[in-house]
Amino acid sequence: MNCRQEGFIDSGVLIILIGGLALGGLFIHSLSTGQDLPVWPAVAVILVNLIGAAKIVIGVMNAKKLRQEQSGKVKPK
């Protein structure tokens, strides 16, 4: 099977992992200090995770399209 991967971990997956760690750090900080969860940093982390998820979806769609073109099974529009 011919697979194309440019790195060890895809950039979209890396964005999701880092965003998850940052959100987890915010939760741990709020629990340990007794303060409320800071809203704007949490919103920023959520937006970064959404962008990472969109990159993953777009990458999968492009890979599927490329695979279909290589096999000659392109559906006419």
Image (cartoon, rainbow, N blue to C red):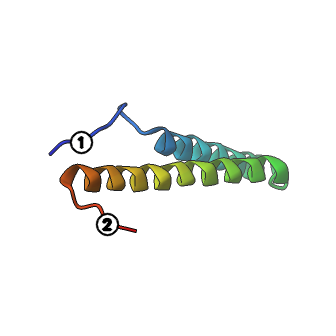
Disc number placed over residue 75 in the picture, else none: 2
Q: Nearer the viewer, residue 36 or 41?
A: 41
Q: Is residue 17 above or below residue 68?
A: above
How many residues crowd around disc 2 within 10 Å: few (fewer than 14), some, or many (20 or more)?
Answer: few
Residue at disc 2, secondary structure: loop
Closer to viewer: mark 2 or mark 1: 2
* x then y, percent, for residue 30: 77, 50
Quarter of the image with the C terminus in it: bottom left
**Contact (CB < 8 A) between labels 2 and 1?**
no
* x then y, percent, for residue 37: 80, 54
**Mark 1 — residue?**
3
**Which residue is painted at 55% across and 42% down in the image?**
15
| 49 left or right, relative to 10 | right
| 76 left or right, relative to 44 | left
Q: Is residue 24 above or below residue 7?
A: below
Identity of the amino acid at label 1?
Cys
Q: Is residue 29 above or below residue 50?
A: above
Q: Nearer the viewer, residue 69 or 48?
A: 69
Identity of the amino acid at label 2?
Lys
Question: Residue lying furthest left in this view?
Answer: 1
**Which residue is painted at 34% across and 67% down in the image?**
76
**Which residue is painted at 53% across and 48% down in the image?**
55
Q: Is residue 35 above or below residue 8?
A: below
| 45 left or right, relative to 76 | right
